[in-house]
Amino acid sequence: MFYRKETLTIAYTDLKTAQERQVEAFVYLMNDGHLAGLPTTRYMDICEVGYRDFGFDPEALLEARAYTREVMALERRNG
């Protein structure tokens, strides 16, 4: 398997009430031993819709893709 699912506790400030809150969220993390790779355009499009639906700035998603490209270039250079 390339990825594993983990649950994290996330602390944040509620923008409407200014109260500190915590929620549990799940994330997918790449297991060690795999080279980075870009998701398909279709998957990126689906993620972008989700970002917009939940009020997240899709720029963060695009920045993550750009960072992944940099990691991939480093991996190619370092063999």
Image: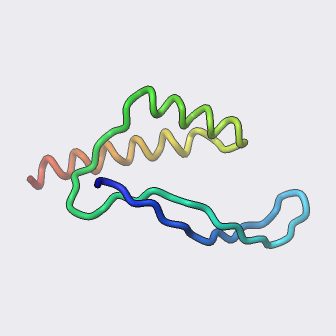
Above or below, comparing residue 12 to residue 50 in the picture: below
Above or below, comparing residue 79 to residue 63 in the picture: below
What is the quadrant of residue 34 in the picture? bottom left
Which residue is at a point 41% across and 27% down the rendered structure image? 41
**Percent x, y of residue 2:** 30, 53
For the N terminus, the quadrant is: bottom left
**Percent x, y of residue 67:** 38, 48
What is the quadrant of residue 58 in the picture? top right
Which coloring applies here?
Answer: rainbow
- Seen as rendered, the residue at the extreme right is 17
**Image-based side of 33 in relation to 4, left or right:** left
- Seen as rendered, the residue at the extreme front is 1
Which residue is at a point 54% across and 37% down the rendered structure image? 47
Total residue callouts: 0
Which residue is at the front of the view, 78 or 17?
17
**Image-based side of 59 in relation to 79, left or right:** right
**Image-based side of 4 in relation to 25, left or right:** left
Which residue is at a point 70% across and 36% down the rendered structure image? 53
**Percent x, y of residue 21:** 78, 71
Which residue is at the front of the view, 46 or 59?
46
**Percent x, y of residue 74:** 20, 51
Which residue is at a point 37% across and 37% down the rendered structure image? 39
What is the quadrant of residue 14 in the picture? bottom right
